[in-house]
Image (cartoon, rainbow, N blue to C red):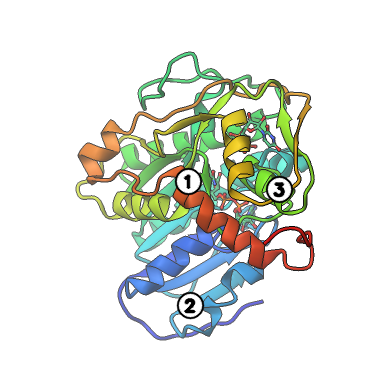
Amino acid sequence: MAKRNKVNRGKVILVAGGAGFVGSHLCSALLDAGNRVICLDSYLTGSPANISGLERNPYFTAIEQDVCDEVELGEPLDQIYNLACPASPPSYQADPIHTMMTSVAGTGNLLRLAEKHGATFLQASTSEIYGDPEEHPQQEDYWGHVNCTGPRACYDEGKRAAETLCFDSLRSGSVDARVARIFNTYGPHMRPSDGRIVSNFIVQALKNDPLTVYGTGEQTRSFCYVSDLVEGLIRLMNCEPNPGVPVNLGNPGEFTVIELAELVLSKVRTASTIVHKPLPPDDPQRRRPDISRAKTLLAWEPKVVLEEGLSHTIAWFKKALPRQRATRNP
Ligand code: NAD
Ligand code: UDP
């Protein structure tokens, strides 16, 4: 599907992975701010439905393409956000070699495009580059603890290599590249079958299915609502001068998996219980961002607490799953 509108206004911004969960919110925010937005996506884990509301906007264009193939665009670009990469463990492990190539070859292709257009570049990196961290909370100068041969490596090592490409491009002067290290983010537009914890628990609760807690559930994550993340990404892209260092973006509120399950159960009228399933290999035990750098450089910190963000997300899933919702749920 490709629909081109040649009207210009604001900046011209390419969002690779723009039909995904985070990307669709980013496209929407960039359009609202008066920019022209080009979404490039293969629809591997994203969906045309996520951007269907945007396609009526004359300043929005959607292009279906895999970033592993060379990317050519006829019009000048001011900025490129690279969000193209499956983000949930089941999705990125389904075709691990393609995941790795998406981060390495795909980021390389988009950096070449940025160089050609003189566009500022932002890479969506991840807290996964810290692996199963031995330091807590995670600061950006921690080098991480990643198993480079395990089933998560295709994602973690791909993202680490993408960061290397960005900083080498910056050092060589070829691209004004920035790197955001994103911690677990949730909100509307997550796929019901995505496999990540927040969407799994909400969908399970809405369907009266047991909530699947992997391992003991004592492992922790810090959950950021998508609107806060999008604000942080835009601030980092537009921050002058380029910080020249990676920046953690996440919500420092830290919860165990069991605490999240109980919170979801308290917010959804449901007959669901909790069942324990095996912990996946290399599952990080603790994760919480130190966001001092984002506070100082971007004057950014999250505003939406977990309970409020979950309410918005549950409300969205209730509408997105109307036929699958059990009759007992409101
Ligand atoms: P998502 O899976 O919903 O979105 C990824 C998008 O990229 C999808 O639309 C998908 O179709 C597209 N894509 C994947 N491979 C592609 C390829 N080879 N070519 C073109 N398009 C491709 O995931 P998300 O949660 O929206 O994550 C967006 C980005 O943020 C990802 O790069 C992810 O690694 C990063 N990130 C997200 C989180 C989070 O918690 N959401 C945390 C850390 C990092
Ligand atoms: N998890 C869980 N049940 C699920 C999905 C995930 O207990 O149905 C756990 C998973 O083992 C991990 C945490 O929740 O400890 C976050 O998993 P997710 O896949 O959302 O993100 P990531 O592990 O990449 O941070």
| Residue 37 horizontal side relative to residue 189, left or right | left
> Closer to the camera, 71 or 296?
296
> Closer to the camera, 110 or 128?
128
Residue at image coords 32%, 53%: 237
* Mark 2: C-beta under 8 Å from nearest atom of ligand 1: no
Q: What amino acid type is highlighted by mark number 3? A: Ala
Q: What amino acid type is highlighted by mark number 2? A: Phe
- Residue 66 pos. (x, y %): 65, 58
Answer with the quarter of the image where residue 246 lies: top left
Q: Are marks 3 and 1 in contact (CB under 8 Å)?
A: no
Q: Which mark is residue 307?
A: 1
Residue at image coords 22%, 45%: 299
Q: How many numbered badges does the structure rendering display? A: 3
- Residue 84 pos. (x, y %): 57, 53
Badge 1: residue crowd in 10 Å (few <14, some 14–19, many ≥20): few
Q: Which residue is mark 3?
A: 205
> Distance of mark 3 from mark 1, alpha carbons?
16 Å
Q: Is residue 169 visible?
A: yes
Q: Which residue is mark 2?
A: 60
